[in-house]
Amino acid sequence: MGDLLDDYRVSGAFDEMFAGVAEPREHYRSLHGVLQTLSRRDFEERCDARDRAFRDAGITFQLSGEERPFPLDLVPRILPAQEWATIEAGVRQRVLALEAFLADVYGPGRILADGVIPRRLVVSSTCFFRAAAGIEPPRGVRVHVAGIDLVRDSAGRFRVLEDNLRTPSGISYVIENRRAMTRVFPELFASHRVRRVADYPTHLLEALRAAAPEPVDDPCVVVLTPGVHNAAYFEHSFLARQMGVELVEGSDLVCRDNIVTMRTTEGLHRVDVIYRRIDDEYLDPLHFRGDSILGCPGVVNAARAGTVTIANAVGNGVGDDKALYPYVPDMIRYYLQEDPVLANVDTFRLEDPDTCAWVLERLDQLVVKPVDGSGGHGLVIGPQADDATLTLLSKRVSANPRGWIAQEPVNLSTAPTYVDDTMGPRHLDLRPFAIHDGERVWVVPGGLTRVALPEGSLVVNSSQGGGSKDTWVLATTAEGPEPVPEPGAEPSAGDKLLRAPQPGPLPAQDAQQQQQQQQCAVRPPC
Amino acid sequence: MLSRIAESLYWIGRYTERAEDTARLLDVHYHHLLEDRWADEAAACAGLLRAMGDERHEGSPAMDADGVTEFLAFDIKNPASITSSITAAWENARGAREAISSEMWEVLNTTHHTLSARARLGAGRSPHDFFRWVKERASMLAGLADSTLSRDEGWSFLVLGRNLERIDMTARLLSARYGESWGPSGWTTTLRCCSAYEAYLRTYRHAVDASSALEFLLLDRLFPRSVLHALTAAEQSLAELEPRAGRTGVDDEARRIIGRSHAALSFLRVSDAIADLPELLEELQGATAQVHAAVTGRYFLDNRAIEWSAEVRAGA
């Protein structure tokens, strides 16, 4: 019996593992049983093994300019099959609605004409780019990859916190976390049936190839990175390697006469699909920031000419602008004629003067976010903020209500997490990743669970010192095993070829000894 | 293959070979001076520094063995030191991570991470441990490259870089040997630098003498660290990169230069080599520099970012 979980105290929030004191939930029971057998020392040895593995493989994250091994907590987060089915349906629905919305605002603008969404909100978005208007992406896909951030409220319901339709990152950590877990904690997997996440790069490559502009036999896909100094460089290189495509930097690309090529040892080679991990503003100095040397001049015009596909499309940011977030349920009803499967977090639209005034009086009770902030920057959690912060916030919000949204604070669910030599409750969220290939939306079973490591903190972003957990989606018994090569009745060619390795010539002395033994063996017992 | 990636692989090959060869050189040099108390330490050190192309210490007070070791092995400010070479190889690998195997990347990454701790230990207590570690890591990388990389263009660039560096470093080593007397056991030391002593004994079956040792290191067709062997391998890599052969000559400037050196060495008498050794070694180093320039010009297309200048309006 170990002492690992002895001091664990359930917090006031919904706890992922425990329904009550020392009472694990049904789907956590088996994991809880294994953890019970571990002592702190066992656990710490595994933590060391994990850090070594991450550091040697160069799976690191830059925090304030320092390379650190990506903080993976070794207690996995488990989602039962039933719950996952809801999440999957909700994410799929949301991606399709946002896809329709983007096609609409960069095209006919029906939803604006019908007054469902105020036109001024859309056109005043800093991510609404006129350069993207009228570009018809192949198969109508603009959101090739989406990351939808979910949180669980104190009632245990999943809600959408925000959408990421530009370049959501974190999938490499999902896959590497799983790999590390299977190495460090193999016995945990023996008692669970966890769905695979490693297929993601295959699905992504298929979707990107399907997005190629013309009917080309073998489309050339590249991953475009800002370079080794980007915080997510590991992920860019990981995806390129796992898909078997080139990882290019802006200076490797040349665009002439609306044809994009890359510089190779055999001259210029045509590029059909660019999976870019560079923000819109830096992508093309002809249209956006002229001082950017990260992108490739002319690439947006090439996309408009239909000779190259940019994934995700330029201008997607208007879809995940936080000021438009409160309208996503309306988009779902408008475009899909369905009710939202996953609810939003209750949000106040500050462009309405009365609401804004009401919110300004209650800043200490609400969460306020800048609409264009990412990575948790600029976010103020009212109940945890001091007076000076709130006064400053009040000034900034009244000066520019369009730049902010206010939300009811959600007490994010917690799960046991090992920090500073003890197991304690920490708040977490979930980012499932979806891939849209034009026909279907595939959601990777699991996603990135991010953990706020400081006790009581609600900010999970890794750029703010957050960690992560391996996320397990359990398979239902009905689903059967994941497709693996079936052991056939006939032995395969490989089996037939199995032979014992040929013994080499034995040194003279050994051969003699063996012979002597054999002679001994055949000698009849006396 | 992307030009940038090809260039990185070429430099990974060069830098790891440079780190390894420098470690070999220093290891033997350092212990030779320890064992042979009759050796002229100052002269040997000055010769070594000169061979490594260092001009900064020219005229300054002579360095002792520890100073040279510090400068050539651990000094991060010296771009040719072992630590600098390993860091440079790692930086190249970091930008080409998807093009090399993850095994290779992990070896280089782990080497780079443990480098400063190893260097501190080596500088303080036993430089030999450090040198052996560098040689082992370089061998591990070479072995993993050999067993995990496809024999495509990338492989050719890696091998080309490695062999060009080997030619250059062996030429430097021999000129260090030539310039200064390392005492009576000097040629044995030189052979040991290249891990060639035992192979030499098996081949010649007699004690080391200048003529045979030089012949072995310069002209042997079978020993993998001889100059001729490295020239053959480099020429082979260049041939793989440009498989189309015309009826006359070669189009590729790099191959022309290396082919000429190869032919010159193939038919050289060892007595002639001894007579013209300084010129010969200088020519070899010159040839590697020219090959490098030709390869860079041909395969590593200039991919510097375009700088945009503000539009100038008349009358503004």
Image (cartoon, helix red, strand yellow):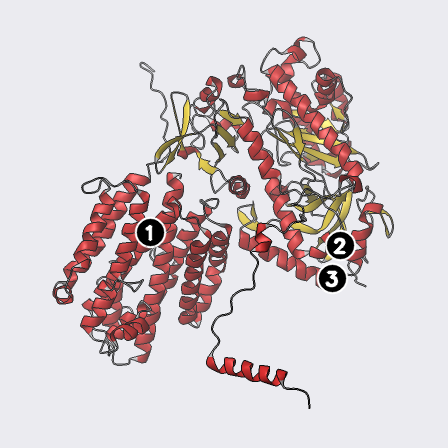
Q: Secondary structure at mark 2?
A: strand
Above or below for A86 versus A426: above
For residue B27, which quarter of the picture? bottom left
Please state which of residues B249 and A150 is positioned toward the viewer in this rendering.
B249
| Residue furthest out toward the top | A113
**Rendering coords of residue A89 (x, y %):** 74, 29
Residue where numbered disc 3 is placed: A40
Q: Which mark is residue A158?
A: none
Q: Secondary structure at mark 3?
A: helix
Q: Which chain letter matches label 1?
A: B
Indicate left or right for A192 with A441 as reference.
Answer: right
Q: Which mark is residue B161?
A: 1
**Rendering coords of residue A455 (x, y %):** 73, 48
For residue A385, which quarter of the picture? top right
Amino acid found under the numbered disc labelled 3: Arg
Residue where numbered disc 2 is placed: A423
**Rendering coords of residue B125 (x, y %):** 44, 72
Please state which of residues A155 and A323 is positioned toward the viewer in this rendering.
A155
**Rendering coords of residue A470 (x, y %):** 69, 46
Q: Are marks 2 and 1 on the same chain?
A: no
Q: Which chain letter matches label 3?
A: A
Mark 3 Cα-neighbour bin, 10 Å: few <14, some 14–19, many ≥20: some
